[in-house]
Image (cartoon, rainbow, N blue to C red):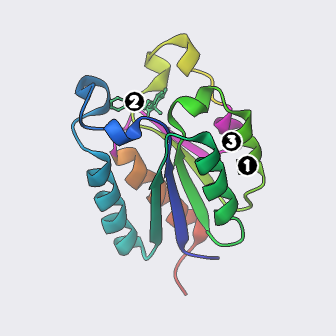
Amino acid sequence: MSRLVYVLNGPNLNLLGQREPHIYGSDTLADVERACHATALHLKLEVHFFQSNREYELIDWIHEARGKAGGLVINPAAFTHSSIALLDALNAFEAPVIEVHISNVHKREEFRHHSYVSRRADGVIVGCGVQGYELALLRLAKLIGDKT
Ligand code: CA2
């Protein structure tokens, strides 16, 4: 299986580290990307890291990952709770999907408790801060298997 992993980030995550540090911590998305590349190196994975505020761009990246990536990590941000289109795109992706949320969405408002993406995800990591991305890569490395 391909050791290429797409890491996708949804709307407003470009503001990470700049606002609401009590909820999302003080690391920026650039810090998260650096940490993902470092972890990927260790796990012999290759990471392609993306963020968009536009639903269609996230969908296009999921389509691009089809037949190419061995796994996908996604923090769909607010699209988690609203987007059937993202769910449909993920349903057309054949390899493992891990959903990540930096905050513990279950401790927050009721509308954050439901995720369309969780209907497709093979694993869900919530409330582990930005470390959730590294945990997701570790899980994908396990699912993809050892480098041969
Ligand atoms: O906890 C998460 O990772 C979320 O996916 C983050 C989303 C939120 O809508 C989900 O319910 C849970 C929000 C991302 C916005 O990120 C910001 C970061 C810093 C400042 C402002 C927004």
SS of the residue under disc 1? helix
Q: How far apart are the two marked residues, 1 and 2, measured between alpha carbons?
A: 24 Å
SS of the residue under disc 2? loop
Q: How far apart are the two marked residues, 1 and 3, measured between alpha carbons?
A: 5 Å
Instruction: Give left or right: position of 52 versus 129.
Output: right
Q: Residues within 10 Å of mark 2 (few under 14, many from 20)?
A: some
Q: Which residues are magenta?
A: 116-130
State which mark lies toward you, 1 or 2. Answer: 1
| Residue occupying the far top of the picture | 110
> In the rendered structure, which amino acid carries the disc numbered 1?
Ala
Is residue 123 or residue 52 the one in the foreground? 52
Residue at image coords 39%, 68%: 40
Q: Report if residue 108 is visible in the image.
A: yes
Could you tell me if the residues under marks 3 and 2 are in contact, i.e. CB atoms within 8 Å?
no
> Which residue was labeled with disc 3?
86
Ligand 1 closer than 8 Å to the CB at disc 2? yes
